[in-house]
Image (spheres, rainbow, N blue to C red):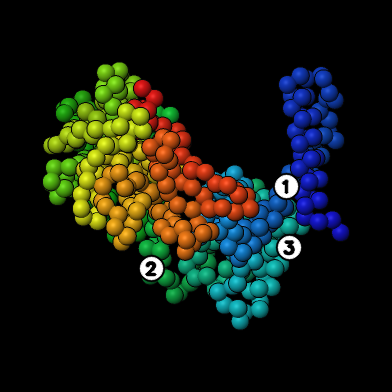
């Protein structure tokens, strides 16, 4: 029987050769064979085979979890290992881990052999019928909406069978009808079902700078929001023009009403913070000199603002002048003796770093903690020279004690650049680790990065 390594090498070589053949044909039509029915049949067969890889991905992710492979990259999170070494997104790594737990992990109630049999049957059916990862993700997302999970495995088995004959869109329609029927027939509905499903996702900015928002609100939250936005039904609301001259649509007026609510919240927070606003904008003197209407400036969120956006928001009561080192872009000094970083220090670090300092991270400042490089418990001061931004994902596994935890990496000051970066632990994949600096596009938009380039 062939080994995993031999099979992987064969697949890799075959796919590479296929890519070359098709690429050459697409670039120079006529240089190879014309597209035939046999070619299409072969492509369909390949796609079905690739669909089976989703089960392999799930099994690998589960093994990574069981073997604590995250230790190899200095983290307690297997998602970091998968994302870094397979070159996939953190979201996809998390998706694979969930599939691995679902397909191969222990069931909540190991005393139910029927449930385990249903899962094994569903797993085999997925493989035999080459059910795509898209359909598998859809099935799990819709089945999460079951009020009672006692019939999960039985419904999952039915959904997997339906997936072999339905399109993705049709499968979604079928699943939602089945879940609705199941929930409607359940006399003992979960009274906290809506609260368990609550979530709010703010997407990344698109080319115009705006973001899509999606989520699910429990009834109480939804009622509050609907009541707060109700005045937007009237033309002229939150606008300096007369109602008859208001050309905005209802949806646009609702967004403007929501903006007003958030502005009032910001004003309250500014008063509590002694005049410091909740939104920080990073720019250098050269940015101001070269400013155009199309200029965009990074903030402590994922959003960049144009000069018009900044004027719309208004200025904070107090402005801050941060003195940066002209070579490293780091703030020269803004120290405190208390453990918690002050608002002024957070603004300085946001201007210097923009985002989390981990070398592949682009989490904005608003989602970051302030990390003491020399721990406070070991005499480290709360000065900007001893602090940097770390998101929650990279802050928790940071190694504050290299001697006690040699399998974990830590942030260090790079003596050549004067910037903080991440030094991975020594392991099989990286026997001689060096400090890795964050050079993401988000970091390179910070004032500190701009100063280094000037």
Q: Position of residue 216 (x, y in %)?
A: 39, 54
Q: Badge 1: how crowded within 10 Å, few (<14), some, or many (20+)?
A: some
Q: Is residue 39 above or below residue 26?
A: below
Q: Position of residue 231 (x, y in %)?
A: 21, 43
Quadrant in which residue 230 is drawn: top left
Q: Nearer the viewer, mark 3 or mark 1?
A: 1
Residue at numbered disc 2? 192
Marks 3 and 2 sit apart, C-alpha to C-alpha, by: 34 Å
Q: Badge 2: how crowded within 10 Å, few (<14), some, or many (20+)?
A: few
> Which badge, 1 or 2, comes first in the chain's sequence?
1
SS for callout 2: loop
| Residue located at (14% from left, 50% from top) | 272
Q: As rendered, which of 429 and 151 lies closer to the eye?
A: 429
Locate the N terminus and report the quarter of the image it occupies: bottom right
Q: As rendered, which of 319 and 104 lies closer to the eye?
A: 319
Locate the C terminus and report the quarter of the image it occupies: top left
Q: Is residue 442 above or below residue 92?
A: above
SS for callout 3: helix
Q: Nearer the viewer, mark 3 or mark 2?
A: 3
> Which badge, 3 or 2, comes first in the chain's sequence?
3
Q: Which label number is shown at residue 50?
A: 1
| Residue located at (67% from left, 50% from top) | 132
Q: As rendered, which of 66 and 196 lies closer to the eye?
A: 66
Residue at numbered disc 3? 124
| Residue located at (30% from left, 18% from top) | 290
Is residue 53 visible in the rendered image? The answer is: yes
| Residue located at (26% from left, 24% from top) | 285
SS for callout 1: helix
Quadrant in which residue 38 is drawn: top right
Marks 1 and 2 sit apart, C-alpha to C-alpha, by: 40 Å
Q: Nearer the viewer, mark 1 or mark 2?
A: 1
Is residue 75 visible in the rendered image? The answer is: no
């Amino acid at each position: 029987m062939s080994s995993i390594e031999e099979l992987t090498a064969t697949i890799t070589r075959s796919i590479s050769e296929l890519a070359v053949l098709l690429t050459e044909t697409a670039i120079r039509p006529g240089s190879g064979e014309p597209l035939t029915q046999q070619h299409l049949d072969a492509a369909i067969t390949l796609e079905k085979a690739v669909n089976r890889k989703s089960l392999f991905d799930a099994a690998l992710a589960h093994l990574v979890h069981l073997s604590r492979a995250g230790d190899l990259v200095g983290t307690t999170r297997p998602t970091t290992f998968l994302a870094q070494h397979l070159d996939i997104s953190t979201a996809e790594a998390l998706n694979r881990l969930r599939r691995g737990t679902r397909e191969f992990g222990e069931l909540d109630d190991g005393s139910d052999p029927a449930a385990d049999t249903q899962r094994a049957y569903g797993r085999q059916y997925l493989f035999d019928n080459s059910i795509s990862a898209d359909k598998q993700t859809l099935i799990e997302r819709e089945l999460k909406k079951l009020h009672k999970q006692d019939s999960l495995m039985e419904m999952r088995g039915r959904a997997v069978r339906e997936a072999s004959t339905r399109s993705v869109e049709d499968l979604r329609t079928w699943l939602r009808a089945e879940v609705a029927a199941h929930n409607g027939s359940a006399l003992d509905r979960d009274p906290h079902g809506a609260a368990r499903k609550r979530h709010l996702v703010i997407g990344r900015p698109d080319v115009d700078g705006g973001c899509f928002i999606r989520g699910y609100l429990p009834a109480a939250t939804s009622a509050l929001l609907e009541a707060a936005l109700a005045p937007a039904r009237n033309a002229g609301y939150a606008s300096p023009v007369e109602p008859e001259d208001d050309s905005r649509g209802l949806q646009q007026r609702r967004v403007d009403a929501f903006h007003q609510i958030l502005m009032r919240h910001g004003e309250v927070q500014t008063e509590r913070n002694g005049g410091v606003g909740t939104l920080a904008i990073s720019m250098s003197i050269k940015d101001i000199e070269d400013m155009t209407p199309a200029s965009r400036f990074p903030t402590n969120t994922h959003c960049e603002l144009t000069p018009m956006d900044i004027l719309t928001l208004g200025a904070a009561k107090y402005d801050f002048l941060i003195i940066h080192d002209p070579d490293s872009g780091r703030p020269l000094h803004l120290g405190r003796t208390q453990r918690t970083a002050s608002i002024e220090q957070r603004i300085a670090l946001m201007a210097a770093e923009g985002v989390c300092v981990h070398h592949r991270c682009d989490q904005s400042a608003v989602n970051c903690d302030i990390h003491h490089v020399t721990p406070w418990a070991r005499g480290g001061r709360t000065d900007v020279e001893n602090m940097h931004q770390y998101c929650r994902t990279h802050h928790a596994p940071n190694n504050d004690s290299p001697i006690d935890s040699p399998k974990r990496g830590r942030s260090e000051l790079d003596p050549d650049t004067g910037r903080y970066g991440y030094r991975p632990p020594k392991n099989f994949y990286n026997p001689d680790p060096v400090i890795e600096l964050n050079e993401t596009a988000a970091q390179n938009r910070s004032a500190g990065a701009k100063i280094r380039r000037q």
